[in-house]
Image: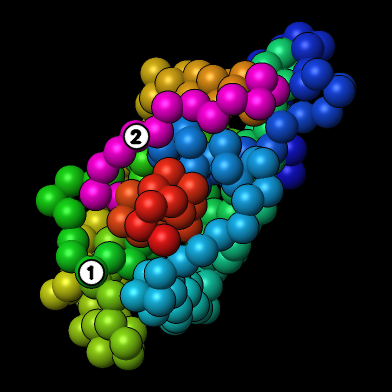
Amino acid sequence: MTRSVTGGKRMGNDGSFIEFYASEALICPRRIYYRLKGYPERWLESVKVKLNQGRNTHEILGEILQKRFGFELEKHLVLRSSRLGLEIHGRIDAFREFPVEIKGKTSLPKLPYEYHLAQLNVYLRWAEAEYGYIYYIKLHERPNTVIEKLDFSDFPIIKGPNFRLFEVPYDESLFKETLKHFYSVKKSYERDRPPKGEYSHACRFCPYRYLCHPSEE
């Protein structure tokens, strides 16, 4: 389902909408730029292993949410701003009256990551929901080893080892910040000039690291 977030008629330079992903909310603008420009991704082998573990974890935990609690999985959405000339596309991991995001991590954070909050916030805006959940679950080569120890008796609150959840309310200011972030990348894309990167530990796992650090190739 497509929903409008701003009015107006202004679109991209060619009349089209620039497509962003909810999972790109508040991440490094240069990474988004390279994706928009069509540069190929080059994932480290160690990252590919984690991505595969994450997919398996999503599949198993998602099946529980679907069969036991009636959630729809991989709910596709589009938020469109005609005034800014952009769209935000996303797939909610699990959705009923509220969205649930499942995040597989090698270590569980004490607080949600800002970009995870921004991603969920996009889903809250689309769903017009007051709150949603982020489920952090520790990655394992056999996800059932972790999931079978979880207690679902007080759902949507889930308890157990190697698992942490956060109930998150909708944040209008965060949504405006997300739109501003995407619009800034859009302007860089239209000028054909890479925006400044956000250099951090996350660079080690970025599929476009080879573009920012060619000497390391």
> In the visual, does 194 lie left or right of 84?
left
Q: Amino acid at mark 2?
A: Glu
| Outermost residue, right side | 15
Q: Residues within 10 Å of mark 1 (few under 14, many from 20)?
A: few
Query: What are the residue bounds of the magenta stretch?
Result: 190-202
Look at the image and tell me in which quarter the N terminus lies. Answer: top right
Task: Judge by depth and name the residue closer to the eye, 104 or 166.
Answer: 104
The residue labelled by disc 1 is: 106
| Magenta segment main secondary structure | loop
Q: Where 54 falls versus 82 (above or below)?
A: below
Quick one: SS at disc 2?
loop
- Earlier in the chain: of badge 1 and badge 2, it is 1
Q: Where residue 188 appears, x then y in whole percent?
A: 59, 23
Q: Which percent across, then down, holds residue 57?
A: 40, 77
Residue 183, given in percent of the width and then of the height, sits at 58, 21
Residue 55 location in percent, x, y?
Answer: 47, 74
Instruction: Say which residue appears at 28% left-offset and 82% top-offset.
Output: 140
Q: In this view of the protein, which residue sits in the foreground, 186 or 94?
A: 186
User: Which of the labelled discs sits on residue 198, or is there none?
Assistant: 2
Three-letter amino acid code of the residue under disc 1? Thr
The residue at the point 34 percent across, 75 percent down is: 46
Residue found at the very far front of the displayed protein: 215
Residue 216 versus residue 160: which sits nearer the camera?
A: 216
Q: How many marks?
A: 2
